[in-house]
């Protein structure tokens, strides 16, 4: 496949990483995202398999190499294995990853791997069943941990746990998490709670900076790894006594957006130039035929409007009401 000039914005940032939401629907009711349960009760209007193929093909022709499938909860799509295969079979795509709440992990992880999935992120906000249920509304922790063990045995290129830091709920579990990864080749990523359109009060109570964790890690002999070209935004730390590693995603830190390399597309075919942008542009009309050129032209032009940074530090959250809309 002949790759054209890669997607580049006005700030000389190159974008080779696409986060693709498959649905807004979710079956968990996490305190930081959907405390009252999912607002989305239908998958009508979500991207079809052929639309996904056309979308990914256009991105690949513009240099995208990594696709992350997100939600909502992407495993609610019955055609998830077909989607994984479709993305993996597009020339130029060398990594297909999935972020999941783990609800179907124990049952389906082997079929995801067989379909071509390369990397897996599982959201686990507590290792204590009672706290996990308090945060997520789910009693599936034991099953999720069993599925995680199965995933390790299947040989994924990357296996990660995502944990949202919550001051009043899981902030005292750092020792538990460190013990968990000491003998497991897993990256545990602590993610600072982000303010969205509907969580101002919750954010004020629960936000906890990752800086205190970073200082503890450094004081205990952890060292920071150099980021790879298509890596996400985490600062990753390693320690000679641990098989696993620790990642910190701190969106309120200085220069967080300086090396942004990812674009987002919603399950309704909207392009998100930033997770917290005010406006989003629909690409649906450009996905109704196989010719990728109009979509490629659209993406090049749209990217010139990407801003240098989000404005979270000024409490401006754009039109993102909650992260289930676009998968974080």
Image: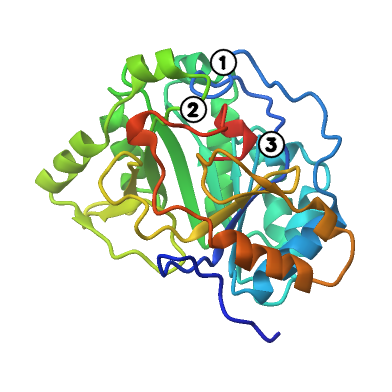
**Left or right of 220: which side holds 4?**
right
Q: Quadrant of the N terminus?
A: bottom right
The x and y percentages for residue 318 are: 51, 34
The local secondary structure at tag 2 comes to loop
The x and y percentages for residue 181 are: 35, 44
- Nearer the camera: disc 3 or disc 1: 1
- Residue 118 can be seen in this image: no
Instruction: Determine whether 142 is above or below 53 in the image.
Output: above
First in sequence, mark 3 or 1: give its number: 1
Q: Label 2 crowding class (10 Å Cα cut-off): few <14, some 14-19, many 20+? A: many
Residue drawn 57% across the image and 27% down it: 321
The x and y percentages for residue 108 are: 72, 44
The local secondary structure at tag 1 comes to loop
Residue designated by label 3: 104
Residue designated by label 2: 196
Q: Label 3 crowding class (10 Å Cα cut-off): few <14, some 14-19, many 20+? A: some
Disc 2 vs disc 1: Cβ atoms closer than 8 Å? no
- Nearer the camera: disc 2 or disc 1: 2
First in sequence, mark 3 or 2: give its number: 3
Query: Which residue ends up furthest to the bottom in the rendered image?
Result: 2
């Amino acid at each position: 496949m002949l790759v054209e000039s890669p997607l580049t914005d006005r700030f000389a940032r190159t974008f080779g990483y696409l986060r693709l939401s498959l649905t807004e629907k979710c079956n968990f009711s996490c305190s930081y995202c959907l405390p009252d349960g999912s607002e989305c009760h239908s998958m009508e209007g979500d991207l079809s398999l052929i639309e996904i193929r056309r979308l990914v093909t256009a991105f690949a022709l513009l240099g995208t190499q990594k696709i992350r499938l997100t939600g909502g909860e992407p495993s609610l799509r019955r055609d998830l294995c077909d989607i994984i295969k479709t993305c993996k079979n597009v020339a130029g795509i060398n990594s297909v990853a999935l972020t999941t709440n783990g609800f179907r992990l124990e049952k389906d992880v082997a079929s995801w791997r067989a379909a071509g999935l390369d990397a897996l992120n599982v959201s686990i906000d507590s290792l204590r069943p009672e706290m996990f249920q308090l945060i997520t509304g789910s009693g599936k922790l034991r099953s999720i941990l069993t599925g995680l063990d199965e995933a390790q045995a299947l040989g994924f290129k990357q296996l990660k746990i995502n944990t949202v830091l919550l001051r009043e709920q899981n902030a005292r579990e750092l020792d538990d998490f460190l013990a968990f990864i000491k003998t497991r080749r897993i990256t545990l990523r602590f993610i600072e709670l982000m303010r969205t359109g509907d969580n101002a009060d919750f954010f004020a109570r629960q936000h906890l900076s990752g800086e205190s964790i970073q200082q503890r890690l450094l004081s205990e002999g952890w060292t920071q790894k150099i980021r790879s070209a298509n890596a996400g935004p985490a600062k990753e730390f390693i320690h000679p006594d641990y098989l696993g590693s620790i990642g910190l995603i701190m969106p309120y830190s200085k220069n967080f957006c300086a090396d942004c390399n990812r674009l987002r597309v919603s399950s309704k075919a909207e392009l998100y130039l930033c997770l917290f942008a005010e406006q989003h542009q629909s690409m649906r009309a450009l996905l109704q035929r196989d010719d990728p050129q109009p979509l490629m032209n659209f993406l090049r032009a749209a990217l010139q409007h990407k801003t240098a940074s989000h404005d979270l530090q000024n409490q401006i959250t754009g039109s993102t009401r909650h992260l289930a809309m676009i998968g974080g």
